[in-house]
Amino acid sequence: MAERLDEARRHTLKLVEPLSEEQLNRVYDPILSPLIWDLGHIANFEELWLVQRIGGRAPLRGDLGELYDAIEQPRKIRGELPILTADEVRPYMDGVRERTLEVLDGIDLEPEDPLLADGFVYEMLLAHEYQHNETMLQLLQMVEEYEPVEVDRAPASEPVAEGPKMVRAEGGPHEIGAPAVGFAYDNERPRHRVDLEPFWIDRTPVSNADYMTYLEETGAEPPMYWERDGEGGWVRTAMGRSEAVDPQLPVIHVSWDEADAFARWAGKRLPTELEWEAAAQGASRERANLDQFSFGPAPAGAYADAASECGAVQMLGDVWEWTSSDFTAYPDFRVFPYPEYSEVFFGDEHRVLRGGAWAARRDAIRISFRNWDLPIRRQIFAGIRCAKDDV
Ligand code: AVJ
Ligand code: FE
């Protein structure tokens, strides 16, 4: 566990290594925290759960808890808070980690306490850091001339397999959600059976080529980061670099509203999250474009050797996929271990996204994982996969 905590931290620090203090502190967008807030928050969350809660120790600085409370401090004011500065945050991260490892040394990972059983709270801490790495990457898209310290070029050159536009998924009973053992968030439980009608689902995520056709025919707004190239085509600018939009890649950085409009234009609809999960059975996160260092999606149709049971490819990795479902509780849901992770977001305001993107850490992703965001949001690494009824 100490090794995994260390790996997560080295990864976080790799992401911010190329940045100046000014870039760490800068508010690039009111809906995204400055990177310096994420760093302090990651360490503060660790201190709260692993040092205070599990270790029973007092915090290093008692006032930090409130500053880094994500519910108390909405993203748009995080740039104005008296949070730790670039030279203070590293010693704080290191100080917390030292105490975390002391506490870890003295505990038993499988006692009666549900927080410790199977190392739950440690898995939760890792997952938290992984998820903040993705929010950090959302912001890094806006950083001029960001030079990653590590790049994985393999996903971009994965071969593309031809195949049908859509594949059919069986109806009938399907098991949905995470099994009772192993790490998962409360919102993925309990595992339960649903009955689905048979349906069709796109074999691959929607490509930029298809999205450009849609834009031409409808005059809809382009995805975030796209601009006209002046000659009827599109360029995309991220991390300070501009490139012609590659027609082969899956479209990314579209909102739910845009995904839904595209699906209807195509004569289809978005899948429900239950349909999505049924169609993803058999997909493997090991053969998927995940873990951040590819810095972009693989072409639509890649990883065909790792298709799901119904024949869909890239269900995991590349782009998050919007579903038609609101983020709500499964039947017999129980909060664990705190309501602010999932429960306070349940309702009809947020839509569920599934499958993870290139910008998600591999170990944060599984078939049952549910992400959510507001239907207008485009800063997430979200794309589209359409479905339709079997008629
Ligand atoms: C699950 C991605 C919606 O970033 O708001 C991070 C994850 N929760 N810290 C978010 C999360 C607490 C969450 N999402
Ligand atoms: Fe958080």
Image (cartoon, helix red, strand yellow):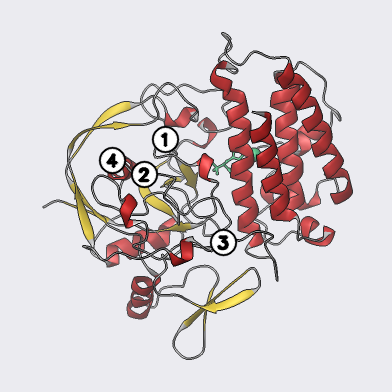
Identity, as a three-letter code, of the amino acid under mark 4: Ala
Mark 1: give few (<14), some (14-19) or many (20+) Cα within 10 Å. Answer: some
Quarter of the rendered image showing ligand 1: top right
Q: Secondary structure at mark 1?
A: loop
Tell me which label, 1 or 3, sits earlier in the chain. Answer: 3
Q: Which mark is residue 325?
A: 2
Tell me which label, 1 or 4, sits earlier in the chain. Answer: 4
Give the CA distance from mark 1 to mark 4.
18 Å
Q: Position of residue 294 (x, y in %)?
A: 54, 60
Q: Position of residue 82 (x, y in %)?
A: 85, 45
Give the CA distance from mark 2 to mark 1.
8 Å
Q: Secondary structure at mark 3?
A: loop
Between residue 283 and residue 96, name the one nearer to us.
283
Q: Which residue is mark 4?
A: 278
Check the image and report above or below for 66 versus 313.
Answer: above
Q: Which mark is residue 328?
A: 1
Is residue 5 found left or right of 224 in the rendered image?
right
